[in-house]
Image (cartoon, helix red, strand yellow):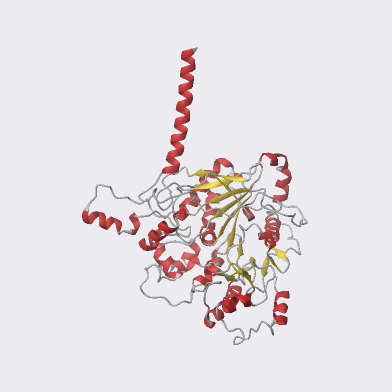
Amino acid sequence: MKILGHITFLLLLGGIWGQNNRNAKAGSKSGKKAGGTQRGDVGQSPPVADVPTGNSRSTAGTDESEQEGVAGARAAGQQTNDMRLHFLKNTHVTCNDGTAAGFYLREFRGSRRWLLFLEGGWCCYSKQSCDARYQNIPRLMSSTGWPQTKKGSGILSSQAGENPHWHNANIVFIPYCSSDVWSGTGPISTTPSRTRQGREKVRERNTNATEYNFMGSLIIREVIKDLIPRGIKLARVVMLSGTSAGGTGVLLNIERVASQMEQLGSEAQVRGLVDSGWFLESKQQRSPNCPETVSCSPEDAIKIGLRLWNGVVPNQCRQLYKRGEEWQCFFGHRLYSTLTSPLFVVQWLFDEEQLKGENIYIGGQFMSEEQWQYIQNLGLELKNSLRDVTAVFAPSCLSHTIITRSNWISFQVKGTSLPRALHCWDRNLEARRNNRTPAKGCPFHLVDTCQWPQCNPTCPALVDRATQQELTLLQMLAAMGLDLQKLGLDPQGDADSLASMVSNGG
């Protein structure tokens, strides 16, 4: 018996060691730059969900999410609020530095609805910009230090009060570690041997392609493959969503995801949710010395990046442009008409990241009259670009991203919140899919009609960067050096007109 006991103990110990070794390999796989500079949690988390203070308004009608809510109610006590980390099974598809790519998953047993979320964080497009990015924000290029679990907020929340229509879906958060706006299909980097010396070593160090991997589009493909055993083939709805660069990633990948699901034999309807990824081309005059980090416009960054990343764009859009002009497909207003999958666009009319592309920083130290004029024109141009978009939510506010905010339910356009608008869109798609007449009085094309930034009363507050105090728009403009009276914006005399604009806003 003692001998049998020793054998059993050794078998158990060997099994534990083998599992730990496999986990260590998945978590510590790295390329040339992995390790050393990493610290703590370098995976970009969505905002931590706040505890909701009240119940959301109920909506009439029954749809897929409501039916699944009833079906899953018995298992609700067994559900976890956390999303759990899974590294990709295909270890050849990696983050920029060669560390393992992966995803966070929270399953809702019995649900046939899947929400895949692409994290944002702009991009890098040259050796200089990528080196700087790796040094300053390594969490966007490496999985080193990713936590085992994450909590979601907004549309990623598991709380019905905060997320009334998607809390009972399977939620997949895909961290952004490819720096390519989710477009890259680049090959594995060939890291030079440590024994290389002299000119060959210098030449390798100065070659972009041997420094980093760019595999954003491949990461999405592999995540879906790894979700097959979890039941994604049986999905009724798969919604590919994302914020900022992740939102642009939705535009670039939604047709590929739909094609992949179809090839798997799935009957799922693939939909897209683009949050703050609908950008306009820059009007800022830049130095011709690009690709230096500080001199590139967003368009130039994408032009150069596409070659570095081996980036892909949707086929139908690519056919509209000659070779070398594919970068135009990164802009939603050029790409939208070529897409066949349903798409919902969420876009602040005065997006702060769009303004930064013009060197305008709200709450910064100075603003010129020309910059103020650009801001006013931006709202009109964005409205025009969204005119033909079927499903849209566009508040007249100065901000960036919405759907992962814990208070996302508080923002409204024409009296309708974003979760309600998404629900109306969902019901409309389900009705058409089942050859039913869509319900009336449930809007999902919502664009503010007021003209000024912050004229919607539900806008997020403006905050002075120096004092961290909340300011009104006119107070902010005055603090940034604008002569309000010269611009016809006298805060004393314009009180009535401002009140009128607000009343016509959200």
Q: Residue at x 54, y 57 (%)?
A: 254
Please indicate whether residue 454 sits to the left or right of residue 146 in the image.
right
Task: Compare residues 320 and 360 and report the one nearer the observer.
Answer: 360
Q: Residue furthest bottom?
A: 486
Residue drawn 58% across and 47% down? Answer: 266
Residue closest to the far top: 1
Q: Is residue 15 visible?
A: yes
Tell me where residue 440 sits by quadrant: bottom right
Front in this rendered view, residue 243 or 145: 145
Q: So how many labels did they put on this image?
A: 0
Q: Give the x, y percent position of residue 12.
A: 49, 25
Q: Residue at x 46, y 58 (%)?
A: 183
Residue 102 placed where, x, y %?
Answer: 49, 47
- Outermost residue to the front: 467
Which one is in front, 323 or 351?
351
The answer, for residue 279, to whether it is visible in the render is: no
Measuring from the top left, give residue 118's x and y in whole percent.
54, 55
460 vs 476: above or below: above
The image quarter containing residue 506 is: bottom right
Residue at 45 percent across and 44 percent down: it is 90
The answer to whether 423 appears left or right of 315 in the picture is right
